Image (spheres, coloured by chain):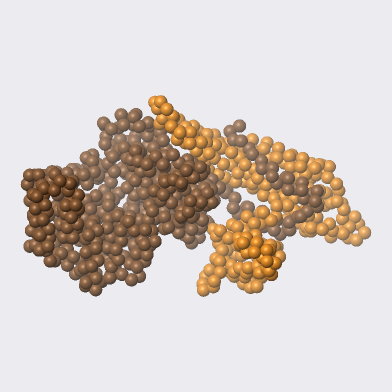
Amino acid sequence: MTAQIHFDSSWQDGLADRVSNDGPWANWDLFKLAVEAEKQTLIPDFEGLQAPGRLPQLTPLPHQLEVAKRVVEHMNGKAILADEVGLGKTIEAGLILKEYMIRGLVKKALILVPASLVSQWAAELNSKFYIPAAAQRKSYVWEQCDVVVSSIDTAKRNPHRDIIYKQDYDLVIIDEAHKLKNNKTKNYEFVQSLKKKFCLLLTATPIQNRIEEIFNLVSLLKPGHLGSESAFFEKYKKAARSVHDDDHLRDLVNKVMIRNRRGDTGIEWTKRHVETIPITFTTEERELYDAISSMRHEAGGLTSSQFSLITLQREACSSREAVYFTLRNMLERQETKSQAYEDLIGDLIRKIERISTNSKAEKALELIRKINDKVIIFTEYRATQLYLQWFLRQHGITSVPFRGGFKRGKKDWMKELFEKKAQVLIATEAGGEGINLQFCSSIINFDLPWNPMRLEQRIGRIHRLGQKKDVEIYNFAIKNTVEEHVLKLLYEKIDLFEKVIGELDDILTRLELGSVEEHLADIFSQSGSEGEMKIKLDNLSAMVKFAEDMKGGEPRAATGNP
Amino acid sequence: MQQPEIHDFLIRYFSSNGCDFEESLPGKLTVQLTEELDRELTNRPFYWHYLEKTGGIPNPMKLTFLTDREAFPDEKGEFIHFGSPRLHQLFTSAKKLAGYVRLYENNGTPAGQQTPLLPWLCVNLKISYQCDRKRDVYQSIGLQLINGRMVSDFHERLVEMNLTPKIPDYSFTLSPLILPKSGLARIQNLLKEGIRKEDHSWAEDARKRWQEDLDLLDHFYEGNEEMPESLETEKTALKEQYEPKINISVINGGLFYLTGTAI
């Protein structure tokens, strides 16, 4: 017999009782209703989706329905959902969870998301999917609620951890799963030890260049799908550093991963307009920057410290406050105070004190007034963020800050303030993840991250489903600085901003050269002269171009759907 | 389920539970709950506990349901559609409150004649085929408790008849020769026999998928000298994910006394 048949005999005892006690009997109308209700909720087929019929107020997009169907019918409920930013992975995961709950295949579900997104997930599951999901706030929630949303950092700590291990989860969903790419971390170990009957890993940046990252992610979902660790690396490590280079590996990965790109969805996206705004330093700003740059050639001094020159250079392109903050830290952390070292820093601080205007901030002010609508300013530095807030207030422009470190409630509050009251939101990098701000359509990149993925996440905050207007992206770059070189490479040569990340993935993996961010850091910190740096940058961009040309005309590569 | 059907369901559910309607319009319904139904639906055990302790006067809730949101855009009330948790609560409640019936056919026997009524056992069932996917089949089976005759789609025939909870005048019931318990056993055997003859490729496929994943898992830990704990966890998870099972559960059922020509 291929399947055990189990007959639930509990009904028969109730019948015997009623026969011997002459009742109580139900009324006929209610009896008929019960049968009708049951017929309505019957699952007629192994295939197909029941969930959309029960969500009349939700209109999933075709690609979202397709993903849900594929996961349930062809992937046995274990999948990496890797759609590009802004295509609605939460909706896809919600549909799948709902489908399994309707079919009675999932009762208990655990949803692990970044702390900042816990309340948003719980609210969406409740309001859009009628799934009674509880945001974990008290430890008894694990046992009392069937569907719990929590941050992984909370979940992995005791007393929670022990309680969670005792629960029998039918479905585990993990958002921002690319954070689990390292199998030596506590988070990885924690997720690995969870019992996962069905499992969804959500990520917008699944495959970077590293083959071990994809191995770790897939092995979390389906151990052995890519073989054992030693066999896998023996086979692939030497031959290819990217998943794209091996057809067999690509097919294997595609069996457990779905990735939609914007272009695949058939949705009309609003356009992205990118404008680079070159800015000239004031004389005082230039003096500071040059002073930092010239230290490269001096023996000892700063170059031996843990703070890299490149960091200071980038900070000098952002604000004098950012430089000052780092210098102060350097002085404080210096263990053996040498006079030369202190003099050097003292000299820089004096240069900082001479600066009276921030050229970028002036430009930002002008732009914000011209836009005359909501604007998000991204900066990498907290000191710049604080300065900008002060600066804008001096000129009568309302702004709210946003940081990754804010508690959930504060994030929600800041978002609401921005939507209803303030004109400008000033966000640091960490604040870029997970908030949806599609009511705003302009971004100023006050300074640039060197990791293109992070840039895409910034843009993804506003260029996503629900955005009605074309999106304007303004990139600030100070002339004749590191910043300008990076921008030239990333924007003018690789055409980064207008490409979305899907295309970028292909290009990056074609590079076979480690991450772009590492490359850039290496180029900028190791180059002995301006000339050497330019040559290295040109090489890098030539390689990107080459990879791109190779790709031309090929069918969908590894990260796409078959 | 269309909105008018849902509206109709609400009316029938609440009226068969003895509730009065304060307002009943197409698309809008205001119901005064009875004490029993308040306890059943509103989930406020503390309130009822408090009343019991203090001996206060019960004040069951009044609920307003909207089945046509557009017709009553500004109305406060619960919008009920096929996905709303409230509707599924009522579905579950109907099943819980109506597990068993006993009814008699009333065919309007003329005075003076005596009509014998034959005993039938009716069972409405759900058969669930489950692996990593699931499918349900509904069946209604009637078993005549004197000669053992079995009939399918029984419930669908019953709903066409005129049935009453009290034995009608001039009718009398014949005593069953088969006890309900053994009747149920016969039905169970018949179902199982039928199921065994079905196409089981879905279960075979599930077992194949299961084995494939088990092989992968073994491969993953190949060469490990000590097997980690997670291996057992993974294996259990795979069993729960794929193992094909068929569950038969009773939705409801009961005893029906019908005339000889009824079926």
Residue in view at x 16 percent, y 54 percent: A327
Image side of residue A216 versus residue A487, left or right: right
Instruction: Tell me where residue A270 appears, x and y as whole percent.
Output: 31, 61
Residue in view at x 68 percent, y 63 percent: B52
Which residue is the extreme one toward the right?
B112
Please determine whether, in this image, residue B223 is positioned above or below residue A121. above
Q: Is residue A248 visible?
A: yes
Front-lying residue, A213 or A139: A139
Image side of residue A320 versus residue A403, left or right: left
Residue in view at x 76 percent, y 42 percent: B181
Residue in view at x 27 percent, y 50 percent: A453
Quarter that holds the N terminus of chain A: top right
Image side of residue A560 versus residue A443, left or right: right
Asked where in the image residue A389 lies, by quadrant, the reply is bottom left
Instruction: Tell me where residue A81 appears, x and y as whole percent.
Output: 39, 47
Quarter that holds the C terminus of chain A: top left
Please determine whether, in this image, residue B204 is positioned above or below residue A409. above
Q: Is residue A67 visible?
A: no
Instruction: Tell me where residue A106 appears, x and y as whole percent.
Output: 52, 47
Q: Colour of chain A?
A: brown
Q: Colour of chain B?
A: orange
Front-lying residue, B242 or A187: A187
Front-lying residue, B241 or A427: A427
Please determine whether, in this image, residue A387 is positioned above or below residue B182. below
